[in-house]
Image (cartoon, rainbow, N blue to C red):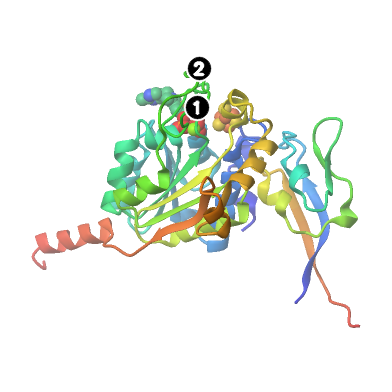
Amino acid sequence: MAKAKLKEHRIDRDWCKGCGICVAFCPKKVLELDDQDKAVAVRIEDCIACRLCELRCPDLAIEVDTEEKVEEKA
Amino acid sequence: MAVKDYIRERFFPHLWCPGCGHGIVLNGLIRAVEKLGMSRNEMVMVSGIGCSSRISGYMDFHTLHTIHGRALAFATGVKLSKPELNVIVPMGDGDALSIGGNHFIHAARRNIDITAIVMNNRIYGMTGGQYSPLTGPGMMATTAPYSNIDQEFDVVEMARAAGATFVARTTAYHVQQMADIIRAAILHEGFSVVEVMSQCPTYFGRKNKQGSAVDMMKRMKETTTPIGSAAKAKNPELIERGIFVQVDKPEYCSEYNKIIERAMGGR
Ligand SMILES: Cc1ncc(C[n+]2csc(CCOP(=O)(O)OP(=O)(O)O)c2C)c(N)n1
Ligand code: SF4
Ligand SMILES: [Mg+2]
């Protein structure tokens, strides 16, 4: 099955209130709060596109944009 | 449809406090409706008053923002006149079980096809942190400065006893389970009750020294367990999550239709 691969985290800085829920519960520690207390994806190469940040965001401020990853033949 | 197609973007950022669990319920509800593939025109959301009840302003369904505790009465009217629509009633713990307690048990008893979502933060958030029937003994509230002595209701047991034909509990931490349960509750024909444990970091959290929204969600993870788990057998204090009741019983609008047919004598 084709797996979802990350394109980008779209974070709405006007909607984000800096609660830190996405930062705390990301299984791969991809996100951080910046000096203005807004969520930013700082380690995108570690993202597994599980969407937990998007699903738990109380402010609907995060969208994990993905594309289908074509499985490479061994 | 995308998430943003279900909301009224002009009202965002919403007014809930940073980290308020009610926003996560909004998020989960959108995922549930999205998965069902229902159109906004098939959905009606009716709410009362409270931080939780503000949710109806944010959803781009047919919405009614009514009066405190009486959302289920308004919803009953909507459902009886338009039984083909899906009616969802999000309520606060105070809205549903203090002032609205009587409406709650009788809507359950009638088994009218409505999905009631109790956004339980164990406090009156909107009015400044007064204790509710879900606060529980030993907890602090602005109206219980030396700690609360009132026993709490168990929403699940109460809904079951009153006759609800779908009863479930989940939390703001368990977002995937929340979306799945809300989806099942909307599909269920009859009165469905979904209790979602939600955090109010501003009042319940602060009064009870439970830390940040993140700390409160970690607590939801630690203090709950799936229904009938081995962990529950070992530690009876754990709160169970999942679907407790899912049974078929005559639904109110269908029964009412039969009465209309009988009264018309086949005309
Ligand atoms: C008839 C009436 N009585 C009292 C109030 C004041 N009031 C507004 S919201 C509320 C309780 C809110 O608590 P809850 O339902 O738990 O919602 P939350 O804000 O915690 O989400 C009360 C008592 C009111 N608006 N109307
Ligand atoms: S007062 Fe509590 S319930 Fe109301 S918005 Fe703030 S955190 Fe949420
Ligand atoms: Mg409340």
Residue B258 sits above or below residue B153 on the image: below
Quarter of the image for the N terminus of chain B: give it. bottom right
Q: Is residue B246 visible?
A: yes
Quarter of the image for the C terminus of chain B: give it. bottom left
The crowd level at tag 1 (other Cα within 10 Å; few <14, some 14-19, many 20+) is: some
- State the residue in front, B8 or B236: B236
Place of residue A15 in the rendered image (x, y in percent of width and height, measured from the top left): 71, 37
Q: Secondary structure at mark 2?
A: loop
Looking at the rendered structure, the kind of residue marked 1 is Gly
Question: Which label number is shown at residue B138?
Answer: 1
- State the residue in front, B208 or A39: B208
Pointer 2 chain: B
Question: Which label number is shown at residue B192?
Answer: none
Residue B58 sits above or below residue A36 on the image: below
Looking at the rendered structure, the kind of residue marked 2 is Tyr
Q: Is residue B198 left or right of residue B195?
A: right
Place of residue B103 in the rendered image (x, y in percent of width and height, measured from the top left): 30, 39
Establish whether ligand 3 lies closer than 8 Å to the Cβ of label 2.
no
* CA distance for labels 2 and 1: 9 Å
Place of residue B240 in the rendered image (x, y in percent of width and height, measured from the top left): 51, 51
Residue B240 sits above or below residue B100 on the image: below
Residue placed under numbered mark 2 in the picture: B146
Residue A68 sits above or below residue B244 on the image: below
